[in-house]
Amino acid sequence: MKKTTKFIINLTSVASIVLIATLNASPLAVVGQPTPNNVDGGPPTRSGGPRFIQPTEDPLTPSNPGPPRSSPGPTRRASQCVKGKIKLTALVPPNKIGRTVSEYPLFFFYLPQTDAPLAEFVLQDENGKQIYQTTLKINNSSGVIGVSIPANQNVSPLEAGKNYRWSVALICETEDRSADVSETGIVRRVELSADIRSQLEKADPRQKTVIYAQNGIWQDALSTLAAARRANPNDAELAADWESLLDSVTLGGIAKEPIVEIEQQP
């Protein structure tokens, strides 16, 4: 089997450092704000689809937003690498900050039609140290992709109260990484209050999505609903929930795209 050479993206940028710094006001965040529409401490009743509520502690926009989403590299090859109207897109709120309660969360992005044979995912801590990196075989796939962080490969779990930067890049030219097309996001692990944990224990997947979304836990709202949709691809209510959740963070244009799986290289 031909060995694939892996490349490491230089992910250190002034914009990301400034953004991460704005999130370090408190050493440990505990999510416990009241969940709307809950009755007697149980799961919330649903009124329409799930809508993400931005935590007030997080800035609505980055201090320095950097390049626009899906900004291509300088070469002509990069500009021709991505096809279609929807470009490579990280599935994150507009401020690019996604909260999670998981030590090993899932990260989602939209993969467009592309000539690139490979994509690369990298996760770094707030000091720029690489925690995890994997290469993805694209094989002409297109749709919403989830990347998992393995818990059994000596990968350190995310620590509560800390911020991490993740990036996905289309490798348009293996010999010229300046041609990469990339997207980035920030993930912050938080802890839940006993009240919210109790609600989640009583909830089904659709209710869990609502609880997470209403309490600003973006990564888990998205991954919970994505898992339900993969298990029930023909469920119209889940499809409507998915559209509502993505629309609440200005990603409604991706809601009709399929959820697909691609191989992660160890």
Image (cartoon, rainbow, N blue to C red):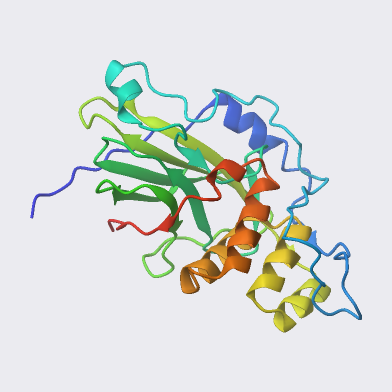
- Tell me the quarter of the picture where residue 68 sits: top right
**Residue 180 in picture, x, y percent from top left:** 35, 29
For the C terminus, which image quadrant? bottom left
The structure residue drawn at horizontal position 74% and vertical position 52%, both measured from the top left corner, is 27
- Tell me the quarter of the picture where residue 102 sits: bottom right
Question: Taking 263 as reference, is 38 above or below it?
Answer: below
Which residue of the protein is positioned furthest toward the left in this rendering?
1
**Residue 146 in picture, x, y percent from top left:** 45, 56
Question: Taking 154 as reference, is 79 above or below it?
Answer: above
- Tell me the quarter of the picture where residue 249 sits: top right
Task: Report the front residue among 164 and 96.
Answer: 96
Task: Report the front residue among 133 and 197.
Answer: 197
Question: Taking 145 as reference, is 102 above or below it?
Answer: below
| Left or right of residue 263: residue 155 | right
Task: Report the front residue among 202 and 239.
Answer: 239
Q: Is residue 198 visible?
A: yes
